[in-house]
Image: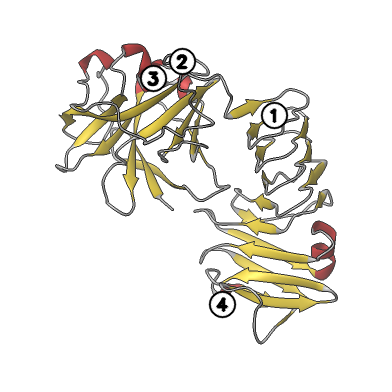
Amino acid sequence: MKTVVVKVFNKKGVVEEVVATTKSGELTLLQARENVNYELVDEQTGKAPDHILTKRVKDNLLISFEKEGKKAELVIENFYQFSDKEALIGVAENGSYHYYIPDTGEVSDYVGNLKAGEIEGQALGKESLDSPQWSGGWSMSDLSLPEMSMPSFGNMGIVKWLAIGAGIIASVPLIRYIKDKVSDKDDDNVIGDDSAETISTGKGDDFIDGKGGSDSIDAGKDDDTIVYDVKDSKIDGGADFDTLKFIDTGVINLNNAIKNIEKFDFTDKASQELKISASDVLAVTDSDNELFIAGDKTDKLTLEGFAKADSSDHTGYDMYTASGATVYVDDDILATNIHLI
């Protein structure tokens, strides 16, 4: 698994920082800003990723850090509303900062110039920058192409992003925007808007974020991830192992619309707090009545009516039981932040 830190620089310094990983099912969302540079840092090397894949979907920029590029790990939302005043940068092996520029060398393939649906590989350019902070005044014509050929990807198994054939870029959508209803049979990412929508996905490990509005979500088969919104009228994970992703900071209020969810995910930089009872677990899970809760040291958890078991059935999780319900709590959540009442 690769972990990439994304640092957002304005003229004064870092104003925001998020973490994206290539772990299956995880997608990091970052809201675009005007007059900033986005620095990409591979946590393992401390340098920029050697190569990234970029795709434009409406005004959003999708980035994959995997060579195969099957799914995006990072979405910069509304990037193309400010694309003439933003840039992707990174630190090369020599320790200096560089812009990411396209493999093709075509001006139209620079990140800020991509048209809706277009996909392009990007690598660090030749000319160095004095600072990662946004300085303004740069233009794409000022950037030099990298002194390298198109990176080799073996058999070029970029099955979802690229179609190799006469150099044509595939039109297969990575994120599908919906106004009413989406039905699909493959791994897919679905992002809605602020209206009330009906979202229905079929087979495949889907990522679903209905955004605002009272959405009705049915994830269907396979291992899906759904971003939680308390206003949603229905959240049904369907069959297999499904995850509910929480991205808001503060106390989490569960609505009564959740079912067939096997995991709650609080693993991000936000600090979340949840109180949950046995009846809550029985309501939100499938017939196994088991709920995994993943988080980190900033999250807090109150378990109402539960008792901690002497041992756990799953490595990396402590087990708690109550009235036919079982909760497995991530070891990364501090014991001092877990309260039994």
Q: CA distance from mark 2 to mark 4?
A: 55 Å
Q: CA distance from mark 3 to mark 4?
A: 46 Å
In primary-sequence order, the first of circles 1 and 4 is 1
Q: Residue at x 27, y 22 (%)?
A: 136
Query: SS for tag 3?
Result: helix
Let me know if residue 148 appears in the view: yes
CB of mark 1 within 8 Å of CB of mark 2? no
Q: Amino acid at mark 1?
A: Asp
In primary-sequence order, the first of circles 3 and 1 is 3
In primary-sequence order, the first of circles 3 and 4 is 3
Let me know if residue 340 appears in the view: no
CB of mark 3 within 8 Å of CB of mark 4? no
What residue does disc 4 label? 336
Asked if residue 133 lies left or right of residue 84, the reply is: left
Query: SS for tag 2?
Result: loop
Asked if residue 309 lies left or right of residue 117, the reply is: right
Q: Amino acid at mark 2?
A: Ile
Q: Amino acid at mark 4?
A: Thr
In primary-sequence order, the first of circles 2 and 4 is 2
Q: Note whether 326 is above or below 228 in the view shown.
A: below
Q: Give how far across and how far down residue 282 sits, in percent.
A: 84, 64
Q: Mark 2 packing: few (<14 Cα in 10 Å), some, or many (20+)?
A: few
Q: Give how far across and how far down residue 47 sits, in percent.
A: 26, 46
In primary-sequence order, the first of circles 3 and 2 is 3
Q: Amino acid at mark 3?
A: Gly
CB of mark 2 within 8 Å of CB of mark 4? no
What residue does disc 2 label? 168
